[in-house]
Image (tube, rainbow, N blue to C red):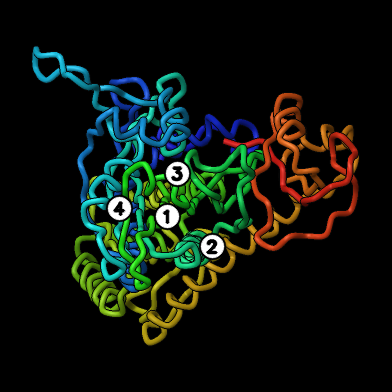
Amino acid sequence: MSKEIGITVKKADDLSEWYTQVVTKAELADYASMKGFMVIRPYGYAIWERIRGYLDRRFKETNHSNAYFPALIPEGFLKKEAAHFKGFTPEVFWVTHAGENALSERLAVRPTSETIVYDSYSKWVRSWRDLPILINLWNSVLRAEIAATRPFLRTSEFLWQEGHTAHATKEDADNEVMQILEIYRQLIEEEMAIPVLAGYKSEREKFVGALYTTTLEAMMPDGKAMQMGTSHNLGQNFSVPFEMKYLGKDEQVHYAWNTSWGVSWRMIGAMIMLHGDDRGLMIPPRIAPIQVVIVPIYYKAADADAVTNKARSVAKLLRESGLEVHVDFREQYTPGWKFNEWELKGVPLRLEIGPRDVEKSQVSLVRRDDSRRLAISDGMTLAEVERCLAEIQDNLFNRAKSSLEALIGQVSDYDQFKKILERGGFLRACWCSSGECEEAIKAETGATIRTLPLTDETTFSGCIRCGKPARKVAYFARSY
């Protein structure tokens, strides 16, 4: 593979350019003709399908169902929850005409679906027997990000799932929020090998219209945090304006309690950035659309049948065990070219099969995470492949966990806070819970409170900015 086809910059030297090259050269995505938009290519979409498949199964196991709601939302719906409307208006794309005819009311192209969903829920909820409603949506949303497009991380349209539920009590809604947050954590840490900090958003950083927001925050190699997923208790902030009432067991009328939650293909961007290296992608096995690639190698026609037959036989064995396997039979490329391409695409394991491997009843195995090469006897192929995939999964998580821990610093002095922030990472600091201090810290340093721990941690100093008695330990960082 030529330098022009492969990655031409080092990750440590220019993360932004490295990221763009990986996304485009590994054929995950491409830029669309319109500013702010991207095309997700089949290989990139296959990763999204793996994420979607995992979540879809977990949601259904917890009694959630999929549905679909309109992509266009009347402006009046958005205005029913004032904070929600104010928060999203700057990002909304508006439809003002149907053909040549001006509409009597503007329609927002779905920036998020709370309002259109709760309009329907208000019709469906009459009694406590109608609750809970547990619905998930798989769709795209549009938010104006035309100025600076970065595939998977910052685009005007993105794929995501958004869950919307209605409950009889706050306790039920609280339980839903935490159940979903744990499902997200398991996906992100156990499937995608990305360690996260779990916690609450501050009042300033919470989802507009929420009672409170829980979040999972990851740390990228450049020292910036990335929000991986959020789960919100919306309280009754939407049920009241949308008249979502029900008759309770006590024969009294009550307003429902709502939650919403979601993750997007931003997780793919985090996976690329966190695990990739100077050769390209490195996809954790549990989320990889191709877990094992088999490359048959022969230079003489006389060897072709034996090599290709063995390649097919090994592929069949692995597929029957549930593994995602691809055999690269392309004749227009050399084996070396194929090796580099599959490394660029981040396939966890490569099996090479040549005439000598046929003779010795073995396969040659190469790991993407550490480039180790092993000769595996035919009788041990499946066991060794499964063992190596499990090791790679653990290795990627442990590497990322070590990096995260190295980028968490505790600080009690504001000047030191500013100095360490230049290095990047999470800064564990005490905070007086004042919105004025939080706003000033952002204005003066560019850092925001990424998370407040789910369980309060003991304060160890005064407020990092004003020095007054602290009420919370917070994790600050600059972010994407």
Q: What distance separates the C-alpha of mark 3 from that of mark 1?
A: 21 Å
Q: Which residue is mark 1?
A: 259
Q: Quadrant of residue 302?
A: bottom left
Q: Earlier in the sequence, mark 3 or mark 1?
A: 1
**Three-letter code for the amino acid on which mark 1 is drawn:** Thr
Q: Quadrant of residue 154?
A: top left
- Which residue lies most toward the front here? 251
**Depicted 294 relative to depicted 111: above or below:** below
Circle number at residue 189: 2
User: In terms of sequence position, does the residue under pointer 3 or pointer 2 come before the other?
Assistant: 2
Q: Quadrant of residue 397?
A: bottom right
Q: Residues within 10 Å of mark 3 (few under 14, many from 20)?
A: many
For marks 3 and 4, give the one nearer the viewer: 3
Residue 278 on image: x %, y % = 55, 43
* Residue occupying the far bottom of the picture: 379
Amino acid at circle 2: Glu
**Residue 212 tag number:** none
Secondary element at tag 2: helix
Query: Which callout, 2 or 1, points to the residue nearer the camera?
Result: 1
Q: Position of residue 190 (x, y in %)?
A: 51, 67
Of labels 1 and 4, earlier in sequence is 4
Q: Residue at the spot x=55%, y=50% of the render?
A: 212
Q: Which of 184 and 406 lies nearest the eye of the viewer?
A: 184
Q: Nearer the viewer, residue 216 or 3?
A: 216
Q: CA distance from mark 2 to mark 4?
A: 19 Å
Amino acid type for the residue under numbered disc 3:
Arg
Query: Which of pointers 2 and 4 lies earlier in the amino acid sequence?
Result: 4
* Residue bearing the label numbered 3: 266
The span from disc 1 to disc 4 (Cα, nearest Å) is 29 Å
Q: Earlier in the sequence, mark 3 or mark 4?
A: 4
Query: Which of the labelled discs sits on residue 46, or is there none?
Result: 4
